[in-house]
Image (cartoon, rainbow, N blue to C red):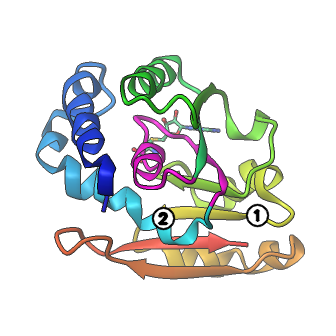
């Protein structure tokens, strides 16, 4: 799934298992399942990101889904947006070590205060959909999309947003994605 970047993906997993755990970004019990639960799961968003897009990964944390997406998709320019200083520092070190500086930048900040226009906003495990939309609409509207990795609640969250979406002239859909045979089904919400 990573093509030529598979070595870099392995290096990223080592960074998560080492510094990620030491710095408290990754729980020690997660190290067993970094590949399926975090790295491959992140790639579920890839099919919803058009070629050559400018992407902002909101609340990137340790780089999920932004760094796996950057490794698998060299056509994308990605901003990793993260408000917490220690996390932003972790992200910058990872981007430097993986040699992604030419097309991945790290910005410390909150989505609702960030200025910029992107084709795609990605996010995973950041906030309920209604709050995410409020925080990020200015980053992708008009013409772009929000692509959020969600759990079982995805369809209910989209249904509950019916009126808000209509008011913002957006439509919502939910796709069930299994990025790899060893990875659990996950749900991707696309608002566009
Ligand atoms: C549970 S973590 C998820 C991190 C990563 N996306 C993942 O899936 O592992 C939520 C992240 O969202 C960030 N965050 C919280 N509020 C935010 C906001 N208003 N704008 C951008 N990021 C935010 C937090 O600092 C944290 O790193």
User: Residue 148: in sight, yes or no?
Assistant: yes
Locate the N terminus and report the quarter of the image it occupies.
bottom left
Q: Residues within 10 Å of mark 1 (few under 14, many from 20)?
A: many
| Rendered residue at 48%/64% (across/down) | 45
| Residue at mark 2: C-beta within 8 A of ligand 1 | no
| Rendered residue at 73%/48% (across/down) | 135
Q: Which residue is mark 1?
A: 144
**Residue 7 pos. (x, y %):** 23, 42
Asked whether 91 or 104 is in front, the reply is 104
Q: Is residue 80 magenta?
A: no
**Residue 121 pos. (x, y %):** 65, 54
**Residue 150 pos. (x, y %):** 46, 65
- Horizontal side of 119 relative to 177 (left or right) equals right
Instruction: Using the rendered view, name the quadrant where residue 25 is placed.
Output: top left
- Horizontal side of 32 relative to 48 (left or right) equals left
Locate the C terminus and report the quarter of the image it occupies.
bottom right
First along the sequence among labels 1 and 2 = 2
- Horizontal side of 34 relative to 150 (left or right) equals left
Q: Which residues, given as a range, are shown in magenta?
A: 52-75
Disc 1 secondary structure class: loop
| Rendered residue at 58%/55% (across/down) | 122
Q: Which residue is mark 2?
A: 46
User: Which label was assigned to residue 110?
Assistant: none
Disc 2 secondary structure class: helix
Q: Are marks 1 and 2 in contact (CB under 8 Å)?
A: no
User: Residue 82: in sight, yes or no?
Assistant: no
């Amino acid at each position: 799934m990573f093509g030529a970047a598979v070595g870099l993906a392995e290096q990223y997993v080592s960074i998560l298992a080492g510094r990620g755990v030491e710095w408290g970004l990754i729980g020690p019990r997660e190290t067993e399942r970094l590949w399926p639960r975090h790295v491959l799961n992140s790639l579920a968003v890839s099919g919803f990101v058009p070629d050559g897009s400018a992407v902002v990964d909101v609340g990137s944390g340790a780089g999920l889904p932004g760094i796996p997406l950057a490794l698998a998709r060299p056509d994308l320019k990605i901003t990793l947006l993260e408000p917490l200083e220690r996390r932003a520092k972790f992200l910058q070190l990872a981007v430097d070590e993986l040699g992604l500086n030419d097309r991945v930048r790290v910005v410390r900040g909150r989505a609702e205060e960030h200025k910029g226009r992107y084709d795609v906003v990605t996010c995973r495990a950041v906030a309920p959909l209604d709050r995410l939309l409020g925080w990020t609409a200015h980053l992708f509207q008009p013409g772009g999309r929000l692509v959020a990795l969600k759990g079982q609640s995805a369809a209910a969250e989209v249904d509950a947003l019916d009126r808000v979406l209509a008011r913002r002239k957006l439509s919502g859909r939910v796709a069930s994605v299994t990025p790899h045979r060893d990875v659990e089904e996950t749900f991707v919400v696309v608002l566009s």
